[in-house]
Every structure is written in structure tokens, then in C-alpha cells.
């Protein structure tokens, strides 16, 4: 046999296989592989490989293909099929390689390093920042073609699939040969090229990684879309969660016309994390199917455009005296929550309470401080058009009441900035605790009554109370109302300077938003 045909929707072809077949097609086109040695049908479904030399010509053919498809450049993994015209900046390549080392290539022996010490390079990205990467001399996929052929050089009838090539494809027990996973050569070939057809990224500095597996439905269209899956800027490599990575990739895909016809809007986001029973290796901890509606993707694209919610470069004290400050990327917590909600088709603010309380349900002051860094971003989010006018009114009525309460405090403090600032902070903490610890609809209504009662007459509340009643009286959505109240506290735009509590003009108790 001197040909091999792989059907995108053939029996046994899963999402990882289909992404790998797309990666194989991208590689063949990117390498300008001779047209006489491969072909793709008009439907973009069946890819056929042809090699010279008869059946035994498979060995030199695949050896030549794998050597160019799975390359190394400057000690970094270089996958021509994953890139568009030109190359990918080295700082992005370094992040992609780090993502691979936490997902498909996470097993240590999969990567042969030149040294145990990571290579350190400085790049000017927004600011000068240090990028570390493992300088490699080899990795498993470069020699994976050997599993496809027998000693004579022709294709095997069945190919053993190790877990080091395809995550999750592991032998049940080494003592029982029958538990080995074997697949057809075309399926194995597709799994090898899944490294090209998928996208791997690290989640911050958490030691976790995410593997994005696009649902390829047309190989011909996917060849145009694959380069767009990659992050376009260094900041885009800093992801907060699997949902965040998947939605960012989908936003990039939608930016090109062919991304719509390629039908790769649906994808799987696979989280890789260490386990208690094996802290040295990453296992598949969760799998999330991300298939957002057009309006949901519009919302997330708007979130990506808010600078205050994007990762930022921060400085830390040097480890040794005399060294320059260390710079690193610091991500936020708001975008991760929004991405999770969008991926699950929920309201973007749902479970906002988790940003101010810990897993034990107690208030986490560190989380509250982190949330303050993103206050400006939250302000822009609540200023966006709302689908539910009642929810918008609730947030704005709380903001208006807070301004009036703090205006009264200003007068009671005899316009002393220090006294006013201390009282304002204590009152904010009391309100936050009241809502964070609310367990029933009555608890939430009690907290709202306290804010509005202290404010006196709230003009917006008096004008729009009819629109508020349906959501306040619906006991089935009390948790959403609690999240809205906490969102209102966190997004409040104070007219006072946060450092000293002073305001240019004394506020009126009837100030409007």
C-alpha cells in the first residue's frame, strides 16, 4: 500500500483526531509539500497521502515529513503548520511551548532539554520583560513516525497509542498487554499532528495548562483559520481560565471571514493540573465544551477591549540586593468569572460573590484587595447596555444611594477627610459582609433596605420601583440579586479621592448618578 486516506468523520475519529487531521493539512500546505504526494477532496473531508517507492516507501516519506513538521528553532518548538505567512514572535512561541509542556508534552521524557537551567531572554513587550523557556534539542513527536511503520518500512496494520502522544490514551495496566490502546495508522497519524491542530497555553503562573481542541468540520477551511487561533500579542498569552482561552480563540476566529464558514466556533477546553496522588504530572482535571451564542461572543469581545480587565505588567522586589526589580504579568479575576459564565450561558455577573469570599464562605480580604485593582473595569461593565432593565436599575439605585449616604457622612464629619474616609470604609465593609453572608431572599432584601434606608429618598428608586419589584419579589433569583448588590459595591465610582477621602465640592445628600 502506497496511499493512506483519512476521513474527517470516519469511524473512531474524535475531536482530537479531527483537530490533528486539520493540523496535518495545515502542515502540508505550509511546507509547500509536493501536490503529487497529497490531496484533499472538494468537501474538505478526506485527505489522502501518496508516497513513492511502493509500500516500503512509507518509512522515508514519513521520516521526511515529521522532520520538517516538528522542527526546532533557537531551542524552541517550531511548528510551521500552526503559523501563517511568516513566523511567530519568539516571546509568543515561548508561551506556546510552555503551554505544550503542561498539556500534550507535559511528561518530562517527552522533551529532551539542552540544560536543566531555563534559558532567559529579555523582550520589549509594552515594557521590557523577561521570558524563560526550556531550550530543547528534541521532543517525542519528532520520532513518532517510527510507530507507524514496521521493520520493513511499510505501514503497520495497527499502531500503539501511548499517553505521551495523546493525553488520556493510556494502557490500563502494564502487566496486561490486552489493555494497550491501538488504532489504525490514519488515526495515529492524526493524533500525532494534534500538536499542530490544537492550541496549548499556560494559566498564569499556576502550573496549570489548557488545551484548546477546535471542532474541525471542514479541513479546507481550517487551513485558513489555524494561524488565527494563536495569540497575536504577548498579553493575549496570559489567560485566566480554560473558558477564557477558548473564548479568546473564538473571538480571533470570528475576526476573519473564513472563520465563520470553517464552523470551528465550538471547541473543547481541557484543563491539565497536578493531582494529589501524582504531583509531578498533569492529568486532565476538567473538560469544558465552549459553544457561545453570537450575543455572548459579542459581550466577551467587549470585555477583551477593556484595558482595566486585561493582564498588566507589575514589578516585584528583586530576590537579591542590587538586582533590578522583577517584572511579570499579573492577571485579574473578573475576566475569568465572566468567561466562565459566558461559556455556561449564564449572566455575566453570576456568582460574583466568589470574588470576595473564600472557599469556606468567609470574606477573603486579599480577594477584596485584588478586586479593587479592577474597579475601573467593573465600572465600564455596568455602564454597558443591560439586557434586563430591572437589573440595571438595581445597580444604579445602589450607586445613587451610596453617594447620598456618603454625602451625609461628609457633613456629619464636618468635612474632615480622614474621619470621613474611615467611616466610609467601615460602612462599605459592613455592607459587603451583609451581602456576602446573605443566605436567603430576606437577607438580601434586608441589606438593600439598609442601603436605601440610610440614603433617604433615592430619586432613581422612586422613579423606577415598578421595574424593580419583579426581581426583588422573585425568591428564586435571590442569589442573583446578591451578586448584583456585591457588583454594585465593587463597581461604585466614588466622587472622593480614595487616598484621603477628600472631594473638591461637598456632596449633596441628593446627588444623582
Image: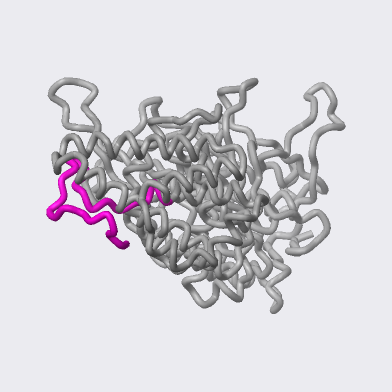
Q: Where is residue 487 in the image (x, y as percent from the top left)?
A: 44, 49
- Judge whether 354 appears above or below 190 on screen: above
Which residue is more in the foreground, 46 or 365? 365
Q: Position of residue 323 (x, y in %)?
A: 16, 27
Point 47% across, 71% down: residue: 255
Which residue is more in the foreground, 325 or 57? 325
Point 49% across, 34% down: residue: 357
User: Residue lying farthest right?
Assistant: 178
- Judge whether 411 appears above or below 197 on screen: above
Q: Tell me the quadrant of the picture where the C terminus can be found.
A: bottom left
Q: Can residue 92 be seen in this view?
A: yes
Which residue is more in the foreground, 321 or 77? 321
Q: Where is residue 362 in the image (x, y as percent from the top left)?
A: 50, 28
Point 81% across, 46% down: residue: 158
- Looking at the rendering, the stretch of residues picked out in magenta corresponds to 488-513
Residue 464 relative to residue 41: left or right: left
- Judge whether 180 appears above or below 263 on screen: above
Q: In which quarter of the image is residue 351?
A: top right
Q: Position of residue 304 (x, y in %)?
A: 41, 59
Q: Tell me the quadrant of the picture where the N terminus can be found.
A: bottom right
Residue 460 relative to residue 167: left or right: left
Q: Does the magenta stretch include residue 504?
A: yes
Q: Is residue 68 visible?
A: no
Report the magenta stretch's main SS. Answer: loop
- Count of numbered circles on the image: 0
Amino acid at each position: 500500500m502506497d496511499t493512506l486516506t483519512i476521513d474527517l468523520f470516519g469511524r473512531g475519529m474524535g475531536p482530537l483526531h479531527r483537530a490533528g487531521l486539520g493540523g496535518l493539512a495545515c502542515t502540508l500546505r505550509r511546507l509547500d509539500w509536493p501536490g503529487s504526494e497529497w490531496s484533499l477532496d472538494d468537501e474538505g473531508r478526506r485527505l489522502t497521502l501518496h508516497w513513492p517507492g511502493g509500500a516500503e516507501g512509507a518509512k522515508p516519506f514519513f521520516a521526511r515529513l515529521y522532520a520538517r513538521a516538528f522542527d526546532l528553532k533557537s531551542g524552541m518548538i517550531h511548528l510551521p503548520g500552526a503559523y501563517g505567512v511568516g513566523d511567530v514572535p519568539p516571546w509568543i512561541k515561548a508561551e506556546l511551548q510552555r503551554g505544550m509542556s503542561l498539556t500534550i508534552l507535559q511528561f518530562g521524557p517527552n522533551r529532551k532539554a539542552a540544560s536543566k537551567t531555563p534559558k532567559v531572554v529579555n523582550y520589549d513587550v509594552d515594557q521590557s520583560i523577561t521570558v524563560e523557556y526550556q531550550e530543547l534539542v528534541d521532543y517525542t513527536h519528532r520520532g513518532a513516525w517510527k510507530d507507524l511503520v514496521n521493520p520493513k518500512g511499510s505501514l503497520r496494520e495497527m499502531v500503539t497509542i501511548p499517553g505521551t502522544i495523546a493525553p488520556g490514551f493510556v494502557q490500563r495496566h502494564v502487566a496486561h498487554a490486552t489493555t494497550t490502546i491501538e488504532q489504525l495508522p490514519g488515526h495515529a497519524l492524526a493524533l500525532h499532528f494534534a500538536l499542530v491542530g490544537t492550541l496549548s497555553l499556560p494559566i498564569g503562573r499556576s502550573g496549570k495548562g489548557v488545551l484548546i481542541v477546535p471542532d474541525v468540520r471542514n479541513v479546507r477551511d481550517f487551513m485558513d483559520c489555524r494561524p488565527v487561533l494563536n495569540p497575536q500579542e504577548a498579553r493575549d498569552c496570559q489567560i485566566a481560565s480554560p473558558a477564557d482561552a477558548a473564548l479568546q480563540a473564538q473571538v480571533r476566529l470570528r475576526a476573519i471571514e473564513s472563520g465563520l464558514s470553517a464552523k470551528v466556533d465550538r471547541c473543547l477546553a481541557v484543563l491539565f493540573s497536578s493531582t494529589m496522588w501524582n504531583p509531578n504530572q498533569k492529568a486532565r482535571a476538567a473538560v469544558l465544551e465552549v459553544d457561545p451564542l453570537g450575543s455572548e461572543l459579542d459581550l466577551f469581545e467587549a470585555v477583551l477591549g477593556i484595558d482595566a480587565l486585561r493582564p498588566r505588567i507589575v514589578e516585584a522586589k528583586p530576590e537579591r540586593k542590587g538586582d533590578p526589580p522583577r517584572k511579570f504579568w499579573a492577571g485579574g479575576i473578573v475576566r475569568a468569572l465572566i468567561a466562565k459564565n459566558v461559556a455556561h450561558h449564564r449572566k455575566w455577573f453570576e456568582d460574583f460573590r466568589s470574588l470576595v469570599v473564600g472557599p469556606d464562605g468567609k470574606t477573603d480580604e486579599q480577594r477584596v484587595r485584588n478586586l479593587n485593582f479592577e474597579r475601573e473595569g467593573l465600572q465600564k461593565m455596568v455602564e454597558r447596555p443591560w439586557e434586563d432593565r430591572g437589573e440595571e436599575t438595581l445597580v444604579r439605585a445602589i450607586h445613587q444611594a451610596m453617594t447620598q449616604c456618603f454625602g451625609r457622612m461628609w457633613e456629619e464629619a464636618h468635612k474632615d477627610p480622614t474621619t470621613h474616609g474611615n467611616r466610609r470604609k467601615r460602612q462599605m465593609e459592613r455592607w459587603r459582609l451583609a451581602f456576602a453572608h446573605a443566605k436567603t431572599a430576606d437577607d438580601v432584601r434586608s441589606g438593600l433596605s439598609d442601603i436605601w434606608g440610610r440614603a433617604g429618598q433615592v430619586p432613581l428608586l422612586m422613579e423606577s420601583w415598578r421595574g424593580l419589584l419583579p426581581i426583588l419579589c422573585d425568591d428564586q433569583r435571590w442569589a442573583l440579586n446578591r451578586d448584583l448588590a456585591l457588583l454594585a459595591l465593587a463597581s461604585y465610582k466614588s466622587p472622593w479621592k480614595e487616598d484621603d477621602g477628600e472631594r473638591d465640592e461637598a456632596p449633596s445628600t441628593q446627588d444623582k448618578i
